[in-house]
Image (spheres, helix red, strand yellow):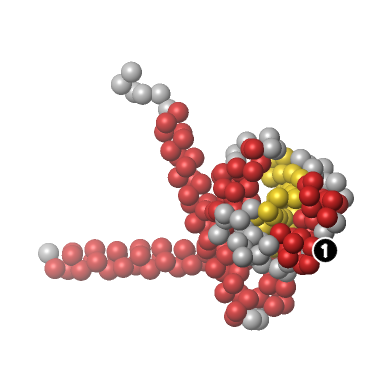
């Protein structure tokens, strides 16, 4: 009995070891693909109904959203996740230099979101209020996959057109040689995987609910 049990334990250890190796290889390959994709140049966004720019990174996210609004790529701009202590005047006029008439007619500041999930909820509520279903999403390049996934989950009926802002963190010359940059991208990739996992569970639940009752 002992040799047979010992053999089973050894087999289990070997299987676990290979499972870990395969998981590590899959993670590294997925991360490499993620890092390469977020560095791609953004396509010119189509004319849409609305623009959503997310706070939390560089100010260029917001200035890019304003520029797209000025170019009439959308009718209205939501800046989501604005700090409650920052006034409209401080952000729009002093930081971004927005024309007062444009700010008054076409820019809304959302202050309820505190993270990416909150951004998605805030943007979805705002878009539904204005009956927008074609949206340009503006955020940093490495943050775009997760932001787009969250907004798609919050508003599955909408067309989301990503317009990522280039950052230095996605420069291969940087993250391949700098541990801080690689860690930043790696953390973002893990968060993105979590969202994809949640999305898969939601899809599975929807399919189960839609399936006919076998006892009927």
Q: Is residue 166 in view?
A: no
Tell me the quarter of the image containing the C terminus.
top left
Q: Tell me if residue 37 comes above or below residue 46 in the rendering.
A: below
Comparing 176 with 54, the one in front is: 54
Q: Tell me if residue 209 comes above or below residue 33 in the rendering.
A: above
State the image coordinates of residue 202 (x, y, percent, origin top left): 47, 42
Local packing at callout 1 (Cα closer than 10 Å; few below 14, some 14-19, many 20+) is: some
Comparing 9 with 200, the one in front is: 200
Quarter location, residue 28: bottom right
Quarter location, residue 165: bottom right
Comparing 79 with 17, the one in front is: 79
Tell me the quarter of the image containing the N terminus.
bottom left
- Residue wearing tag 1: 97
State the image coordinates of residue 71 (x, y, percent, origin top left): 87, 50
Q: Residue at left 61%, top 44%?
A: 124
Q: Tell me if residue 61 comes above or below residue 158 in the rendering.
A: below
Taking the view exactly as shown, the residue that stands out farthest to the right is 71
State the image coordinates of residue 84 (x, y, percent, origin top left): 60, 61
Q: Secondary structure at mark 1?
A: loop
State the image coordinates of residue 107 (x, y, percent, origin top left): 75, 50
Q: Is residue 18 in view?
A: yes
- Position of 66 with respect to 202 (left or right) is right
Q: Residue at left 61%, top 65%?
A: 85
Q: Residue at left 82%, top 46%?
A: 73
Q: Tell me if residue 133 comes above or below residue 67 in the rendering.
A: above
């Amino acid at each position: 009995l002992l040799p047979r049990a010992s053999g089973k334990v050894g087999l289990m250890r070997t299987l676990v070891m290979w499972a870990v190796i395969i998981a590590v290889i899959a993670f590294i390959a997925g991360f490499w693909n993620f890092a390469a994709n977020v560095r791609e140049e953004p396509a010119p966004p189509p004319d849409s109904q609305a623009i959503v720019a997310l706070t939390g990174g560089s100010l260029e996210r917001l200035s890019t959203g304003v520029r797209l609004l000025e170019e009439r790529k959308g009718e209205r701009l939501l800046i989501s996740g604005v700090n409650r202590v920052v006034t409209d005047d401080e952000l729009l006029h002093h930081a971004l230099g927005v024309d007062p008439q444009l700010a008054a007619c076409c820019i809304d500041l959302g202050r309820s979101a505190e993270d990416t999930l909150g951004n998605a909820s805030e943007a979805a509520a705002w878009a539904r209020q204005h009956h927008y279903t074609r949206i340009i999403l503006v955020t940093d390049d490495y943050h775009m996959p997760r932001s787009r996934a969250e907004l798609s989950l919050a508003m599955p009926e909408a067309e989301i057109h990503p317009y990522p802002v280039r950052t230095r963190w996605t420069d291969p010359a940087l993250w391949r040689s700098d541990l801080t940059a690689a860690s930043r991208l790696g953390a973002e990739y893990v968060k993105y995987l979590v969202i994809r996992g949640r999305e898969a569970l939601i899809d599975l639940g929807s399919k189960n609910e839609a399936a006919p009752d076998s006892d009927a």
